[in-house]
Amino acid sequence: NTAQTIYDLIGEEQIRLLTKHFYQEVSKNEALKKLYPEDLEPAEERLFLFLMQVFGGPDTYSEQRGHPRLRMRHAKWKIDAAMRDHWMNAMLVALDQIQVDQNVREAMMTYFVKAANHMINHD
Ligand code: HEM
C-alpha cells in the first residue's frame, strides 16, 4: 500500500502547531476550560501524539497510553452538542492557522466532525 497518509502530506510540525493552536483556543473558552486540567501542556502532548498516530504517523500515543478508546476516556465529562460545538470551533480555528492544502484540510475536518460527534454522551 503506497497511499499517502495525512501525516506524510503535512508532517509532524504542522500537527504540533495544530495542537498548540487548539489548546490556545481551549484556554480562551470558559466552557471547555472547566473540563480540562489546569495545566494544559501534558494534555497538548497527548492530543499531539494521538493525532500523529491517527493521521498515519508513529504509534507513540499507543505505546505510552495503550489503545485510544477515546469514547470511554471521555465518559467522565458531560459532552452534549453544545460542548461538541465548543470543541469543534476550537479545532476549526486551529486548522485555519496551519499551512495545509485545501483537500487535506477537508479530509481532516471530515475526520474531526465524525470523531467529535462520536464523543457526545449527553442530551
Ligand atoms: C482528552 C474533552 C473531543 C481526543 C480530553 C480531555 C478533555 C477532553 C477534557 C482531558 C485532557 C487531557 O488531560 O488529556 C473533549 C471534549 C470533546 C472532545 C469536550 C468534544 C467533542 C475529542 C475528539 C478527539 C479527542 C474529537 C479526537 C479527534 C482526545 C485525546 C485525549 C483527550 C487523544 C487524551 C486521552 C488520553 O490519552 O488520556 N478530551 N474532547 N477529543 N481528547 Fe478529547
Image: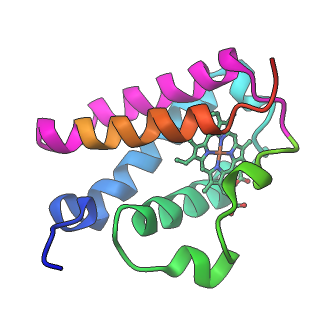
Residue 47 lies, in percent from the top left, at 55, 56
Q: Please tell me how many numbered marks the rendered image carries.
A: 0
- Who's the residue at 79% across and 35% down the image? 35
2 up-or-down from 22: above or below: below
**In which quadrant will I find the C terminus?**
top right
Colour approach in the figure: rainbow
92 left or right, relative to 67: left
Q: Residue furthest right?
A: 76
- Residue 7 lies in magenta, yes or no? no
Residue 25 lies, in percent from the top left, at 52, 30
Residue 63 lies, in percent from the top left, at 60, 84
4 left or right, relative to 55: left
Q: What kind of secondary structure does the magenta stretch mostly adopt?
A: helix
Q: Residue furthest front?
A: 1
The answer to which quarter of the image holds residue 93 is top left
* Magenta-colored span: 77-105
- Who's the residue at 45% across and 59% down the image? 51
- 4 vs 64, nearest the viewer: 4
- Who's the residue at 39% across and 28% down the image? 92
- Residue 99 lies in magenta, yes or no? yes
The answer to which quarter of the image holds residue 55 is bottom left
- 23 vs 100, nearest the viewer: 100
Residue 34 lies, in percent from the top left, at 81, 29
- Who's the residue at 68% across and 75% down the image? 65
5 up-or-down from 104: above or below: below
**In which quadrant will I find the N terminus?**
bottom left
77 left or right, relative to 17: right
